[in-house]
Amino acid sequence: MSFRTKLFLVFLITVLASVSLVAYGVTHYTQAAFEEMDAQRTDALVAQFQKEFAQRGDEVVHQVENIANAEITLRMALDLARPNADPSLYVHDATGAAQDHGLDFVEFVNADGTLISSAQYPARVGYKSEWVTAEKDWKDSKAFLKKEELPDGVALSLTVVRTLPVGDKNFYIIGGRRLDQNFLASLVLPAGMRTLLYRNVEPGFVPSALTDAGGEVAQADRFAPIIERIQRSSEPVVQTVNWTTNPADAETFHANGLTGRSKELLGVLLVGSSRRELVTLTTHIFEIAGAVVAAALLVGLLISLWVAARITKPVEELADGAREVAAGRWDTHIRVRGSDEIGQLAGAFNEMTLTLAEQKERLVQTERVAAWRELARRLAHELRNPLFPMQITVENLQRARQLEISSSWKFLTSPPPHCARSWRI
Amino acid sequence: MRILLLFSSPRAFIFSLRFLYLIFFAGVFLAADVPFSRAQNPEDTVRGLARRVAEIRDLPEKVAVEWTNVSSLPEPESIILREAFLKELSNHRQVVVTETSAALLHVAVRETPTNFLVVARVATSAGEEVRMAGMARTAFLPVMTRGNGLRLAKQLLWQQAETILDTGEFAEFPVGGLPGDAVNGAANSVMDIFILKPDAVAIYRDGGERLSEIQELPFVGVVGGYKYASRGLRGEMHRAKDGSVAVTLPGLNCAMRGPGAAGERWSMQCVAVTTTVEATAATAENAQVPTLSSSCDASSWRLIGEATDWTQADRLLLVNAEMKREEAVATVDFAGPVRRVAGTADGRSALALVFNLASGSYEIYRITMVCGR
Amino acid sequence: MRFIVLRWFAGGRLFSAAVATVLACTGGFAAAATTPRYGGTLLVELHAPSLVLDPVKWKIGAPEYAASAQIASVVFDRLLTLDRFGRFQPALATEWSHDAGWRRWQFSLRSGVLFSDGSPLSTADVAGALQELLAEGSPGKAVVTAAGTHVVVQFPSAVPDLLEQLASQRYFIYRRAADGALLGTGPFFVKEFTPAPSGTTIARYRLAASEHCWAGRPFVDALDVNVGVPVLRQLFDLQLGKADVVEVSPDLVRRAAQENLRVWASAPVSLYALQVGADTASPGKGGAAQLASAKVGLGEALSLALDRATMANVLLQRQAEPAASFLPQWLSGYAFIFSSASTMGMGNNVARAKEISGPLFAGASGPAVASPTPLRLRIDAGGDLAKLIAERVAINARQAGIPVQVQPHSLTRDASSGNAASGEKTAETAGLRLVSWRYSSLSARAELDAMVATLQIDKAADEKEKSVEDAEQLYARERRLISERELIPLVVMPEYIGLGAEVRDWMPERWAEWHLADVWLDGKRTAGSSAGAQR
């Protein structure tokens, strides 16, 4: 593995590790923050439900008192207090009262507990409602949850009872608002949240007893563990239900038991917050982190490449230079980049090759000088032999000149034999 | 009395003959041992029932008979049947006692749309035994009776099963006399009671105990093509200004003139008219005033009725001009709707035409005011 | 209140004095003439979604055809009618006779009777209609022949109550045209039909008076029959004077009375009964015999548990009567025997019912809702009333430890398209059925036969028993049927009709035959005969 690769890998790993670390950290803490926020929101919703519940209860109280104070009710109570009164006269009165006062359930009960009129279950007329007469004083009693039997099943009702004293007897007015999907639909919920109501009318879990604001709940049997836990302990339960393998489809449910007057469990309110947002956010963060990591990897790769290239290039040049030098090219010169250690090394290398080259030159010069000297020595030897005749000739010429010029030229055109030889050399 | 009613008019006579024919017809087949009988003498039917009751096995020797009539059968008829039943029961070795300790034989008279049903029930050791006998309701035709009342007295003058459209009391006299003299004339002349039936006007004279028919004037033949099978009970009589008695019927207007001299009879002339025009035209004429006077006081009294349809028993209320209905000083009840109240010539009484809901017969009452209670 | 016009014949002086008196004192009284008036349009509102004027198409006992029968009775005539005093009155037939064995009946036809199109009624028309109507149904298969002015009806067995039958139910005389349309001889004929505009359910039939009706022209010019009108709307229309004759639902009768509306009640003509289905006793699946005994036990427990008195007197506000028999008292004459507690166990006996139902529904003794498989109670008829009765039955049954679940009408309608058709299906489907039956015959025997045949309650019927019956035999048969507890009578209910203030001479039979042709209108609306046409 080359130094460059090593260097590259080291760089790369370092970048990756640090980016991942940061991404993880951000994701983790964001998720935790969101979870916290979600829990707070659910708490707020439960609180809102309680408030709404109380408010509805007050409304029902108000409406039932209105019915109790109506003259028609008073007249009915007075009439029914008479001996041999005909209750059949009033069979439909509860329906009218319910319509007039916007209540889902209205019942009139005689002093002995006999049901005189029922808006929600007219067929029950004539049967006794002993729970009403069992309570001594209904005055100022608040709304409470009650299981209401209806022709097509059982409903939960937010019920209020008021009495109308006629002589020493009481006439009872029972009014209620149905706790059902409409009630749930009237709750204002942030996006991604929903409320479900389980009517606890039978032991064990009955899927059809579970409704949300839209009516029937799909895969209701998935709630069985939650409901059963509440049925056992009545303690609030928080549980996440994974609807599919996709975690985004999961929902976290905060389940609270709703109890009646004698603390019996009548229903369970489930506030579900979808984990989709959370999961989406987390996924988003993960995706961003991934993208960042990938980008970092790419950039790191490039930078590493570049940096590694930048760092290893002079070294490689040095190595090449050294290899050149080793190959005998003494005059190898490498570029010097910067003044760092590598630059200095390159400079030193260059100096080294320079010195090496100079020394080689000098050696060559010395050898050349020696050769020239030998040549000269041999030349001198050669030269001395012709020179002497030449000297005589020159002397002769000098003397000839002095004598006549023309004759000299003849002399020159026919050199002596020594001279001819010397030209060939 | 029943026979009298049967022959109260030719049509009734024909009707009765038809009915008797039916009885006879059915009677013949009864002899052929057909268990389902339509018509039989009611007393015989009840006697037959008594015999069958006596034949019940385990029937105690002593029985107390509780006879109840929960039907429209007139009580006198019920009593006749009861007596026949008890007598027949005694004839069959049953001792009828009144002690409450004895076995109780419940006998109830009930009715179906066509029959009266006498149901006898007795508890025996084998459980309750039930015997029944049915008799056609048509076996009991309306019976003439007379009645009295107090402050407003009603007196039944006439009763028949056939439709009566209108009634009125008219004096024979006024021929030639001015209408204004009618009162004086009436005082001197004979008053006849006119009964307007779908097919004829019958004239009766009140003979104190009973009405006797003196004349009947049928419409058929008077005007060619007149068909009296008309829907509804419309048709009325009133004294016209020329002294004649005007009769308006669907498709027919008639005028009846009284006898000019003793021994003569009423005569009638008729003209055919369109079906729908006459009755509405007659209404305005009819909007005359109902008053009733008496020697009790000097004021004018009116009779007002209450019923608006044929399902309710009616009553007439006596009020004067200032009174409201609620303040009526006297009432007289009837067993059905009052179809018409017609004043009489002397103003002392009125004739009320009543449809008896219980018997299905038409009855004419004379309503008079009686002083004191 | 009516002001009866006393007519005064005395003459001018008293006449004018009397006129003065009446003018002076009309303040407190609304003067109304008793003389029938012609003209006007009678507005009739019916709840039924449509009219079926073809008698052959009616299902016997089905309440949905009752309104059609009422309107059919003004379009068609019968051979004879029965009045409220038990007298057969001639209608299209003027005379009738029968042979010794009650098998051969002969009717003489009234002459000169015309159909609404002006063509004369012939014996062939009568024979054709009777042949069609007698082809099926209780009197048995008849051969009807026309002979001169007579129509002869020949039955294979004795039919002593033929007159009662022909005077009631669907035995109208009509002529069937080639296209299937029916012509009648009655006082009215259907002149025009306006289908319900989209978005509403109210269709209108206009029936015009027949000028040449043999019994005389009816008083009103026309009948406007609106069908598909909701019951509450009918009451409002009556109050507002927009209708003259309306059906008043029994639960609205009190209200109508409080508002001073005229309401006429017939004799009880509707029966609500509980039919115990064949395989209801699901716990005992151990073979046919066990099943049958379980069914009888269930029937007995149910009839002991049912609280009919409260149902009729409180729940239905005394607008119905507790029923202990299939046939009403007015029809059979003996029904009161069943009503007495000694023979029927009318008073509800929950303790005894529990004892009987205990073994059938072992384990269901706890709260009723926790029971394993509740019996389904299907409701045949629509409407709140049937639902109310069914719910009461369910409550009563639960008190006796019999778990019962009411199935709303909308769910059951698909399963049983009608009373008669659903007969076969009854045996297949489990549970109970709330049957609503409308009496239509004046013959008690025919009515019971029709009920038995339609509801298939008497599978082990003795053929001999079905032959000629007198009241006592009929009683014995009905007692046996009641003791079998396949059909438990609950309540009988009259028909209530609200009448407008201007309606005069409303003269119905107590078995709810209206006689609309004899009704006339008083007041402004009859002022001109064109007034009706203008509305």
Image (cartoon, rainbow, N blue to C red):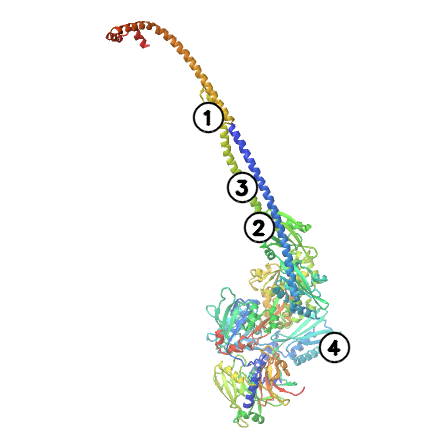
Q: Is residue A187 visible?
A: yes
Amino acid on which the number 3 mark rests in the picture: Ile
Q: Which of the marked residues, 3 or 2, is nearer the chain's N terminus? A: 2
Which residue in the protein does label 2 denote? A192
The residue positioned farthest toward the front in the image shown: A402
* Residue C184 % position (x, y): 49, 73
Q: Secondary structure at mark 3?
A: helix
* Foreground pick, C215 / A335: A335
Q: Are the residues tagged 3 and 1 within 8 Å (C-beta)?
A: no
Q: Position of residue C446 (x, y in %)?
A: 59, 70
**Alpha carbon of mark 1 to alpha carbon of mark 2: how far?**
67 Å
Labels 3 and 2 touching (C-beta < 8 A): no
Disc 2 residue type? Gly
Same subunit, labels 3 and 2: the answer reads: yes
User: Mark 4 to mark 1: distance in Å?
Assistant: 153 Å
Q: CA separation, marks 2 and 4? A: 87 Å
Residue A180 position, x and y percent, is: 61, 57
- Mark 3 lies on residue: A288
Q: If you read the primary sequence from the N terminus, does the residue marked by circle 1 or circle 2 appear first?
A: 2
Task: Indicate the secondary structure of the residue bearing disc 1.
Answer: loop
Give the residue type at disc 4.
Answer: Thr
Residue found at the far left of this picture:
A406
For label 1, the crowd category at 10 Å Cα-Cα, with few meaning under 14, some 14 to 19 and many 20 or more, is few
From the image, tell me which residue sits under label 1: A335
Spatial separation of the CA atoms under disc 3 and disc 1: 44 Å
Residue C31, picture quadrant: bottom right
A369 or C82: nearer the viewer: A369
Q: Residues within 10 Å of mark 4 (few under 14, many from 20)?
A: some
- Of labels 1 and 2, the one closer to you: 1
Which residue is nearer to you in this view: C265 or C75?
C265
Q: Is residue C122 visible?
A: no
